[in-house]
Image (cartoon, rainbow, N blue to C red):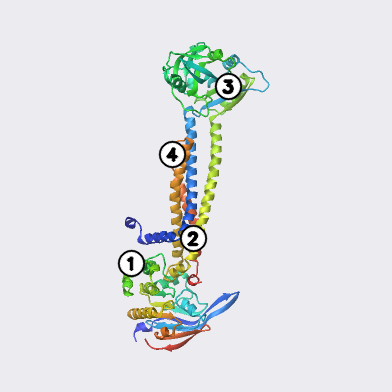
Amino acid sequence: MRALSTLLPSALIQTLTEAVDSLRTLGKRSALALLGIVIGSASIIAVINIGHNARHDVALIFQDMGVDSLSVLLADKPGTQESRLSFDIEALNKLDLADLLIAPAAIVSLEAGFNRKTADVRLVGTLPSLFGVMKLSMSDGRFLHTFDQSENAVVLGHKVAVSLSQGGTRIRVGDWLRLKNYLFKVVGVLQPRPESMLSPIFVDDSVFVPLQGLARVAAEARINDLIVRIPPHNKSASVVPTMQDRLTRAFMSRTIEVITPQQMIEGMNRQSRTFHYLLMALGGITLVGGGVAVMNIMYMNVYERRIEIGLRMAIGARRHDIRNLFLIEAVVLSTTGAVLGAGLGMVLAYVYARVSGWAFDIAANAIPLGVISTVAVGVFFGLKPAIAASRLPPVEALRDY
Amino acid sequence: MGVLADVKIISMKGVGKCYSHNGALIPVIRNVDFELGVGDTCAIIGPSGSGKSTLLNLIGLLDFADEGEYQFMGQPVCAMHSDELAALRKMHIGFVFQNFNLIPRLSVIKNVALPLRYRGIDRNQSMAQALQMLQRVGMAQRAHSMPADLSGGQKQRVAIARALVGQPSLILADEPTGSLDGQTASAILELLLSIQQEQRVTLVVVTHDHQVAQLMHRQVMVHGGRVEEVRKCEP
């Protein structure tokens, strides 16, 4: 208190001390009003921070792929005969989309073997362009090359390489991988890479083979996805419709569904916004509930301290002195609630981030916004009882009922 | 007689006050002419419901007169704003109540220093003045006690200290001994009168007790809202 007295005028210190004493004498009732305020403040702060961390997480999802990538789903039209991989390759070769970087992916699940170890893998038949389109990076060796197209060459995802190496000989470039009855030469191992919502390929769990190589071990395989990267110089709005039109013509028997990162981001943002608004509304309602509790306790306080109000007026307190006396109590209550709520809100946001597997980051506006809105609610709901106290006629206030 | 003796602390002419009850105006105080000078002591006596407390409230600027003229220390107060009246009360009037009206959350010394706070006096200075006043009423050793820990007589001593700490011109005491036993009441009254004489402050006491009234220079009887002087002797 002595340190405080050097910073604040003594009258203010006395007013604050009196406000704290007064709230302390109200005991459980103050605690209940405080609880409402704490919950309201914590909800607001937690919601703002959770929203911030959710956006941060979405940004991370697209960080690797980049927002200039898009994914195309190829599905069979109902009632049409299933196409074959060779037809798909032919259609792809005829495709006139020179401006775009396109990599096909025909994905099947298979068992791969090395020495005596086996692992279930996702075998991805693709072209060398996938390396650039997905911005992959090598841990060892090289990616598929055009001259590998008729060869039995494979590139391993990080997890596949690790699981085939566990408890035995480490699989290396130059080793032979068994896929059904064929042996494929390992030409490279990829760097680990986080999963991306946009990509249909889980790089770490996959083994990459040339499309012709895939046809040998999985005759039924077909191109299910195209990964497309739009070069920076070709950002016109007509790129996606043009591409969709040409793909529809090239793959007559397939339906084409283009998923752009913008669509996904917008979808996620819409979902996030709805969730955010819902929680904000809940936080707001709780805060208003806390505010009403503050108003109730302040009215009770005014009623119980009627004689004190009369006495203060008798010894010279003006109306605004009385109003400020009660308003400061409301501010002290709501500020205490806001600060405690800020701490609780941050803990909730941290726990939520950890449970969701997100990185925790403090939103710059969460604490100021939460604390200011809580104090504002306290002032708003504390003002009416404070004004009512200041308007009590001194004779009425002093009357001993 | 000095110049000071001619100054009227209170000057009421034809003052009346009504209260509204079920839409009808009921007069409580009617046509009161009343004056008090510096250093006067006056007892207001009368039966319950006669209007004694209403008269005290009007004198103490806690209530507004509906008719007549009231000059407090030479200033007409009937048209004043509530904040102006508060300023006059702050500087010139001290109140002593039957139920003491100490603030239970504040220590004895803080209760006594409270009027000085509204005068804007620095905290250290006001605490020093409050302690000095507590010494005068014999309560300095209980300065940091809480009101709940005091007896009735001690509480009234503290209340007297609070009324006098700002050196007011007028002390208004509403049944100051009404809640005390006979012996304590005598001691409190003795204290009040001795300080009144020391500071030459004007004292108005509302009382039912004729023995208390006998100690005042003047006695006015309020009966049916009318005020009548029943005794007047020079201080």
Work out whether disc 4 and disc 3 sit on a shared chain.
yes
Image disc number at residue B127:
1
Q: Which residue is mark 3?
A: A224
For disc 2, the chain is A
Q: Amino acid at mark 1?
A: Met
Q: Along the line of sight, which residue is nearer the eye, A91 or A50?
A: A50
Which badge, 2 or 3, is on the more N-terminal residue? 3
Q: Amino acid at mark 2?
A: Met
| Local secondary structure at mark 4 | loop
Calculate the distance from the C-alpha at mark 2 to the C-alpha at mark 3.
67 Å
Work out whether disc 2 and disc 3 sit on a shared chain.
yes
Q: Which residue is mark 4?
A: A361
Q: Along the line of sight, which residue is nearer the eye, B215 or B89?
A: B215
Can you say whether A280 is above or below B190 in the image? above
- The location of residue B70, given as percent across then percent down, is 47, 79
| Local secondary structure at mark 3 | loop
